[in-house]
Image (cartoon, rainbow, N blue to C red):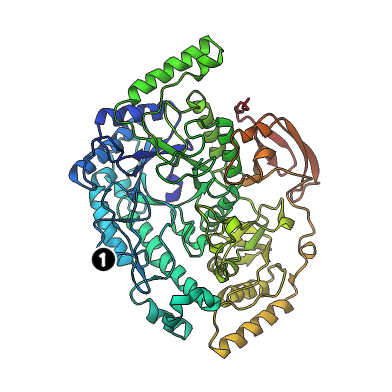
Amino acid sequence: MSSHELLYPDSRPWTRWWWFNIELRKEGIKAQLDWVKANGFGGVELAFVYPLPGQERGPDFLSPEWSSKVAFARRCCESLGLGCDFTFGTLWPFGGTFVSEADASQRFDGPSPQRLGRSWELPKEGRILNHLDRHAFLRYADRLGAALADALAPAAESEHSIPRSLDPSIPGSSALFCDSFEVETEGLWTTGLGERFQERFGYDVLPFMPKLDEHPDVRYDHRKLIADYILHEFYEPFTEYSHRHNSFTRVQCHGAPCDLLSAYAAADVPESEAILFDPEFSRIPASAAALSGKPVVSAEAFTCLYGWVPYPGPGPHQCEERLADLKLLADALFANGVNHVFWHGMPYQAQAQAQAGQEQADSRQLAANSRTPEAVSRKPKAVSRFYASVHVGPDSAFAAELPGFNAYMERVCGAMKLGRPYSEVAVYMPIEDQWMKGELPKEQQKSSARYYWEMHYLRPPAELAGRQPLWVSSPFLERARFEDGTLQVGDARFSLLYVDCEWLDGDGLAQILRLASGGLPVCLKRLPRHPGRVVDKREAKKYEQELEALTRQGSVTSELSVLMQEPPVVSGEDAPDFWCRTVDDELLFFFGHPASRGLSYPMEYGQSAKAGQTRRDVRFSLSGVEPFRLSLDFGCCESLLLRVSRTGRVERLDLGYAASLPH
């Protein structure tokens, strides 16, 4: 059993738990966790955020009193059979008043002016940590880790528990969480970067920095070096640190100017986000997990469902969310590789949780005795809320439906963790194309998207539909091998490599040539160019020679149909999105309701009303089996889970749930 199989051992959804800087009471902590347990959650992630107006402040951040309350919450979770993770800082990105000027984020022209807003420490605004310096990170981590030491300490072990403290190769049961990369990236710099740039690229970058966007080739080289810094000086040290401190990492890497596949793979659990990021973005962390052998792909789910409003909010229809809309989004995430859900999220309630829980029980009983809308809609009033989040708690608009929905997500996620991901095609992620570009057009920008390199709009080629393509990048091709007609990378298996990019770095070209020379079929849609500023003529000549050698390989062509004459595993007009896992000699398919396809930010309020009964006729094409057709019948807002044997036998597995459509 690998250590990663111990992470999130059951598939119940978790919720982010917004710990505001207010008075923390043990009875309130215990009451909320009792409610979490009773409503089908598997655990909580403590997120330490801003004070609430008119309420008494809580303990100082990282103080002994703060540490004591955090440790108390962890022990309560353990007593209830719940997990407990911790955001490794206060709000986002990493930073705080205790970050020194020497350890703070830098620009090429001096210290970064960015400060940490909406944190536990308000009205004080701390500096942003230098994410390009592992020594700065480790000093930050030592400060956080000391305050979390009691909370992270192994629980008293029963005769049935895993002796984690005796085996350092086994991570602890709690994750240290890192939210999306929200460091200001314009002119990003660190000590020694100029010298390293000169060594690597053969010229001085500093004269270009004031007007870097006027020189896309230089900007590319700068971004390539920054990407290496972020990976090796932040994401990798973060995971290394967690393993030394009885924990593991769960990380959202989106927003970071780096190879997202490598960054996600550096975490123990790569985490996506929706719907500020469209569900199809989740294929990137899901690909990273497959390439690096990580079985869990989580998602911060239901964020800013109907739109984002700056602090203090609220967002549109907050506290009025429709559960059928949430299910539509969850199914879109599952169809793009997510198999563990983190609700975003539940606010800490100082006193009201026990009372609200009782009122929720009373409301359920009333609803059972009377089917009138007034009876069903009676629910406790929200006491506090996080400004940009679906509201989770006894006072949720969907509280009565929550246990059933959580049980549904648990069943789907449990199935989607079995075996390994199925895929027919590895698609070279066009990172170079994105790094060579600047800002997105204004009409495509949103609160979570400004640059092309953030990959918001990256989608697999349409001609690969039904083949469950996964993204791949140069570092993974370097460790890949082609044997017995199969390209193997981590847990992923492919029949073909698909390359369609305007720019292709020399490292990537060399790996593609190596694999093609060994017989790997490569669909090369067009001839790429060398990105960045090439000052060494020998490098330019080598690139042209390797590109010519690649085109001469007999296994390389621009026509996909020449290389893949077999139809995709699933095909059909308007076929629904799906995710597939290989489990022993069977395939396990999850099909989201067709209305969950192509969801985009923001969702319409009541969008699930479009998810009525429908049918899709599809064809399954499995290796060694005569292709066969099957009608997929979807009930209202319903998804399907199918087990398909290699002999063509199909079994529909009961998910036991379909959300009610809004009226």
Q: Quadrant of the C terminus?
A: top right
Q: Quadrant of residue 386?
A: top left
Amino acid type at circle 1 is Glu
Instruction: Please indicate whether residue 39 sits to the left or right of residue 329 in the image.
Output: left
* Visible residue check, residue 128: yes
Residue 605 coordinates in the image, percent (x, y)? 58, 35
How many residues crowd around disc 1 within 10 Å: few (fewer than 14), some, or many (20 or more)?
A: some
Residue 564 coordinates in the image, percent (x, y)? 76, 60
Q: In this picture, is 629 found above or below 166?
A: above
Residue placed furthest toward the top: 369
Residue situated in front as seen by the camera: 73 or 179: 179
* Visible residue check, residue 1: no
Q: In this picture, is 297 found above or below 200?
A: above
Q: Secondary structure at mark 1?
A: helix
Instruction: Please indicate whether residue 476 sits to the left or right of residue 22 in the image.
Output: right
Q: In this picture, is 371 found above or below 102?
A: above
- Which residue has dot 1 on it? 101
